[in-house]
Image (cartoon, rainbow, N blue to C red):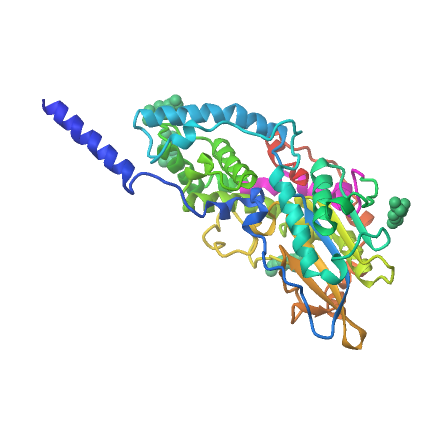
Amino acid sequence: MCVNYLFLILSFLILVSKTTGSCHKGHDKYFKYLATKTGYRFIQNDHDNPLQFPDCELTKVWGLVRHGTRLPGDKIISKMKNDLTTLQQEIIDNYSQDKSNLCDISKFKSWTPHFELNREEKSLTMEGQRELLALGKRLRNRFPTLLNQKFDNDTFFFKYTKTQRTQESAFRFVEGLFGREASTEVWYPRSVKQDPILRFYKACEKWRHTVDHNPASFEEQEKFTSSKIYRQTVAAVSRRLGFERNLTAVEIKLMYTTCGFETAWSPGFDSPWCSIFTVKDLEVLEYAEDIDYYWIDGHGYPLTGKIACPAFQDMMNHIGSSSPRHTVFYFTHSGTLLKFLTHLSLYNDSSPLLHNNYAHMRERKWRVSQIDAFGTNLVFANYRCKNNRNHLLTLHQEIPVLLPGCQELLCPLETIQATYRTSLHECEFEQMCKHEGGGKSTGSLREENTDHDEL
Ligand SMILES: *[C@@H]1O[C@H](CO)[C@@H](O)[C@H](O)[C@H]1NC(C)=O
Ligand SMILES: *[C@@H]1O[C@H](CO)[C@@H](O)[C@H](O)[C@H]1NC(C)=O
Ligand SMILES: *[C@@H]1O[C@H](CO)[C@@H](O)[C@H](O)[C@H]1NC(C)=O
Ligand SMILES: *[C@@H]1O[C@H](CO)[C@@H](O)[C@H](O)[C@H]1NC(C)=O
């Protein structure tokens, strides 16, 4: 009798906690913290009115574009099919035994690993196609005098790396510019694996050895994932899902990555893997990603930004050229975009991203969720203004950015030439990339991270 009564109260309390605020619901702005798996729609700039400056005429456009939302690589696909479905079952079991603190399990029950069918790993998804198509249209609207023109092989130039996702991104972007039918006339040069402009770092032995494959580059991230704050995050998520053990950092990362991909792929789909995190968890997970990219593709090592000088020079040569070619767009990868931004000295915080300065770096500029989402783009537009003076407008994610040394968004070309004089006059790529000394081999641990350039 007494036991029954107690049971009734208990059941009632559980019901109350599940229907009121004390059970866990997830955070409604989770999409702001998804790092390099952020879909472009979350950061795109929909204001695409023509950009006009009095007494100025647009003469050149040069753009660098990361491919749109893609599928994961084979390794992650396999983990999502295996490890994650096992975790899913455990999460459901825990819930049914009232061990879990989730409010709602229905999304977990109906979840299955889903990938667009018949597509190879890392290929561009439907959403990725939409991202690039829409980006092409908005840029055409912003720069109508050059981009709202018929395709002409003498005036337009488009190039992609040797991958399906950048090729397809280029095709859709160009469709956004010229329309479907005319887009089929566009000529593209043959893509190469080690493109000196689109993927300069592939040819840089020194960067590969001293940064990309250097265990020290991963130290801060590793230390952060074993720090107290990260372990507390892991413990909190584990308890919430009803696990007695602590999940591993790798398991948490898999859930977070799946949350990112599923959110990027399908507008309107609420991934259950996003709903397990609080905003505090997401901030911690995001910081681990930011640290990672900071040391591999960002300001962590001076060499990383430096080696983008061939691409920077390509931009400046195009801007200053008198050839009839007025528009150039390159379709490439995260590793290229981040190094180029680094080369420009953008998003350079006054302190490095370390395992032990999480709180201090809360307001950091280096945030890959914003600066390196899928479809990330950097566009330079040259305007010839009064007295034939050239001015450069720089758009990152379709928003004008102020380059160092510039007083105004429309920045005199001479100012930029002065700020980046070393890029223009001291870009000895062969020399800065020559690697002397033995190659330090990397531990198997690095499997996950060494393919930044494949993003
Ligand atoms: C387009 O121009 C390139 C040079 O930029 C040339 O090599 C190519 O043959 C041209 N293609 C067509 C179809 O005219
Ligand atoms: C939750 O599920 C896991 C895996 O099945 C199990 O090891 C664990 O004991 C469960 N948690 C609780 C609190 O029963
Ligand atoms: C889980 O991790 C937390 C934080 O590090 C720790 O306090 C706790 O003892 C761990 N729990 C288990 C079951 O290992
Ligand atoms: C970034 O900032 C640091 C510290 O302020 C500075 O030493 C470094 O030269 C800067 N890097 C670039 C590429 O501007």
Q: Is residue 233 magenta?
A: no
Residue 57 on image: x %, y %: 76, 69
At 68% from the left and 54% from the top, the residue drawn is 378
Report the side of 64 relative to 45 (left or right): right
Q: Position of residue 246 (x, y in %)?
A: 40, 31
Q: Kindly identify the residue that appears in the image at 65 percent across and 55 percent down.
A: 138
Can residue 369 be seen? no
* Residue, far front: 181
The one nearer the camera, 397 or 352, is 397
Residue 434 position, x and y percent, is: 79, 44
Residue 213: name its quadrant: top right
In the displayed structure, would residue 426 be above or below residue 180?
below
Residue 63 visible at all: yes
Q: Which residues are magenta?
A: 192-221
Q: Is residue 297 left or right of residue 310?
A: left
- x%, y% of residue 300? 62, 50
Q: Is residue 91 above or below residue 378?
A: above
- In which quadrant is the N terminus drawn? top left
